[in-house]
Image: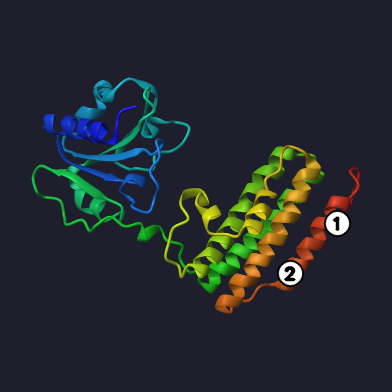
Amino acid sequence: MRTEKQMLDLVLEVANEDGRVRAVCMNGSRTNPNVPKDPFQDYDIVYIVDDMESFLNQPNWVDVFGERIIMQTPEDFSLYPSELGGRFSYLMLFIDGNRIDLTLIPIEEKESYCQEDGLTMVLLDKDGSLPLVQPSTDKDYWVKQPTAEQFADCINEFWWVSTYVAKGLWRQEILYAIDHMNIVRAMLLKMLEWKVGIETDFSLSVGKNSKYLMQYVDEQTWEKLMHTYPCGDYEQVWGALFSMAALFEESALEVGEQFEYRYPLEEAAKVKGYLKHVQKLQPNATEIY
């Protein structure tokens, strides 16, 4: 596996030899001092370029970075709409295990790009024309204190979507139920993130997809969270739903107390009663109540 130095030397060598590349930046986990290093970290590289079209007309130009296992160019996808506007990205996994996520950005967007991400680091500026980039920090990604509206919306979404899970389970539509379970769990994770934020004075990030959450919650909370991940068994999904509800309410009450935000106990009790009722509802029922 090529070392970090070898990879960055290659990235800069390619840029220096190509007159169309005017600057090189990097962001992501490799510029974040708070993220532990491991061999799966991507190289999130940006080439700020002129004559963007010439790159797109020569798709094999990226072969210079090495032999690949697979590549994805999301802006070419018809399955999902492009989200980068005039930018273009090459996501490349190489046979030595390294991965480069390389984004081309038109030189006209250099000012806006340099202000987008606190983890941006300039590796090369041929023209000395990039705006001043502050030292890399993940502060933009720290858990933020919720407003009363955000707190209320999270609670409402949790309990509202939980009724979809119950409906799917009664109908024996396991995929529908689990899909909505994931929406419910996203609200639980958001509430747990706010709880961590309170305990750490909102001074850190729990990472993408809450991946560092385990480091900041107690063992009992973590075990409860793990119990909300069921397999494709109906009774397990029901059990996971109620485990999720208990942990969510416990966490929401703590967060609400901290900020003096109201938790709708009566409404939540009604929804929990509804969920238990649907769980016991006969498969051939023609009415819910």
Outermost left residue:
127
Query: How busy is the neighbourhood of tag 2: few (under 14 within 10 Å), some, or many (20 plus)?
Result: few
Say left or right for 210 vs 139: right
- For marks 2 and 1, the one nearer the N-term is 2
Instruction: Determine which quarter of the picture holds residue 107.
Output: top left
Q: Residue at x 19, y 28 (%)?
A: 54
* Disc number for residue 289: none
Instruction: Determine which quarter of the picture holds residue 133.
Output: bottom left
Say left or right for 261 vs 167: left
Please give the residue where the numbered disc 1 appears in the rendered image. Answer: 277
Please give the residue where the numbered disc 2 appears in the rendered image. Answer: 267
Outermost bottom residue:
260
Marks 2 and 1 in Cβ contact (< 8 Å): no
Q: CA distance from mark 2 to mark 1?
A: 15 Å
Q: Amino acid at mark 1?
A: His
Instruction: Determine which quarter of the picture holds residue 6.
Output: top left
**In the rendered view, would you say 190 is above or below 80?**
below
Query: How busy is the neighbourhood of tag 1: few (under 14 within 10 Å), some, or many (20 plus)?
Result: some
How many badges with numbers are in the image? 2
Which colouring convention does the figure follow? rainbow
Q: Residue at x 36, y 22 (%)?
A: 68
Indicate the secondary structure of the residue bearing disc 1. Answer: helix
Say left or right for 21 vs 267: left
The quarter of the picture where the C terminus appears is bottom right
| Residue 187 rendering spot, x and y as whole percentages | 60, 57
